Image (tube, rainbow, N blue to C red):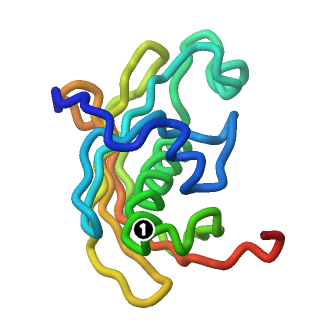
Amino acid sequence: MSNTETIFDINQIKEMIPHRYPFLLVDRIIEHVPGESAVGLKNVTMNEPQFMGHFPQIPVMPGVLIIEAMAQTAAIVVVDTLENKSAGNLVYFMTIDEARFRKPVVPGDTMHIRVTKVQSRKTVWKFKGEAFVGDTLCAEATFAAMIVEDQDK
């Protein structure tokens, strides 16, 4: 996980998915196999709003936000695969399975978010996601999501 080349930077990510601060949870994409997989980076910092209320004495990244970071990374794979035809559309979770949280992610960590496509059918995509800090697996899950056209676009 030492590769730090930027494939998509934060500005490109913002063109691809609709999330914005404080809920944009991917800072850049450093590995990408079109239509198949990606590795995103999230630099976890103490000034993020969740740390004010989520165990403020011992701040820990909420597991649901780690899974959301996986989903956002997967959404970038989908948008790129569909050649930006779905850019800015909404992606809704359908299932989250086999979620495991193995080690806390804390401020100061750089989380590597690895997602791999399991299958896709029309607007439904299923991925396996893993979150690492260094070589340590911190969380994993399998999830499916559906692309829905944003009616406000």
> Residue 14: x and y, percent?
59, 46
> Residue 41: x and y, percent?
38, 34
Tell me the residue at 61%/10% (across/down).
57
Location of residue 50 with respect to 126 vertically, above or below: above
Tell me the residue at 54%/13% (across/down).
58
Q: Which residue lies furthest to the bottom in this view?
A: 122
Which image quarter: residue 51? top right
Q: Mark 1 highlights which residue?
A: 78
Is 151 positioned to the left or the right of 29 in the image?
right
- In this view, the residue in front, 75 or 60, is 75
The reply to whether residue 89 is visible in this rendering is yes
Tell me the residue at 35%/49% (across/down).
100
Mark 1: few/some/many CA within 10 Å (<14, 14-19, 20+): many
Location of residue 106 with respect to 128 vertically, above or below: above
Q: Quadrant of the N terminus?
A: top left
Location of residue 80 with respect to 13 vertically, above or below: below
Is 36 positioned to the left or the right of 126 in the image?
left
Which image quarter: residue 125? bottom left
**Secondary structure of the residue carrying numbered label 1:** helix
Tell me the residue at 55%/36% (across/down).
62
Q: What residue type is labelled 1?
A: Val
> Residue 144: x and y, percent?
44, 73
- In this view, the residue in front, 101 or 18, is 18
Q: Which residue lies furthest to the right in this view?
A: 152
Q: Residue furthest top?
A: 57
Mark count: 1
- In this view, the residue in front, 134 or 78, is 78
Location of residue 108 with respect to 19 vertically, above or below: above
Q: Quadrant of the C terminus?
A: bottom right
The reply to whether residue 102 is visible in this rendering is no
